[in-house]
Amino acid sequence: MAKILLVADAQTVLDDLEEALDDGTAELRSLRDGHDVRLAVETDPPDLVVADCQVGHMGGIAICMDLKLEESGGRAPFVPVLLLLDRRADVHLARRSGAEGWIVKPLDALRLRKASRALLEGDTYEDESYRPVPVLASAPPER
């Protein structure tokens, strides 16, 4: 049974995450303060951390960076992180933080399950739903 740690300070976000990810095959725990994540990971390492970008005092990007720095220093185990981003522009920050995956809001259960499954299997997940669509210019008509 996979252990998933959910981090958000908004109860509605936690409710959405629990509803999408509670399929009977995972143990879900939730935290409302980003400062508590490192201790939770060190004490009882989850198989996945899902963190909202907007958590008061310590958001998802900072949580991810903190976990990756602790891991690189040998003080914490590797735990994949799925970030819940507010806008497409945050993808740059998600990449820089070392996150294994991210989803751009609004959230939907299908993408949440797909992303969490990928990270639990050791893969990465990049949400492409908000990627700009390339527009190819056509050549002007010949005269």
Image (cartoon, helix red, strand yellow):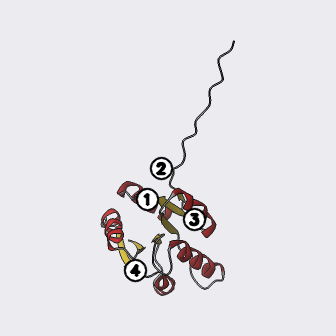
- In this rendered view, identify the residue nearer to me: 99 or 94: 94
Q: In this view, does 111 lie above or below 31?
A: above
Question: What's under tag 3, amino acid-wise?
Answer: Ala
Q: Earlier in the sequence, mark 3 or mark 4?
A: 4
The residue beneath circle 3 is 94
Give the residue drawn at x 40%, y 80%. 31
Q: Could you classify mark 2 by the number of other residues whose Cα lies within 10 Å: few (under 14), some (14-19), or many (20 or more)?
A: few
First in residue order: circle 1 vs circle 4: 4
| Residue hosting label 1 | 105
Spatial CA distance of label 1 from label 4 is 19 Å
Element under disc 3: helix
Q: Residues within 10 Å of mark 1 (few under 14, many from 20)?
A: some
The residue beneath circle 2 is: 129
Decide: is 51 above or below 137. Answer: below
How far is disc 2 from disc 4 in space, using C-alphas?
27 Å
Residue in the image at 62% along x and 30% along y: 137
- Which residue type does callout 1 highlight? Lys
Residue carrying label 4: 32
Splitting the image into 4 quarters, where does residue 4 fall? bottom left
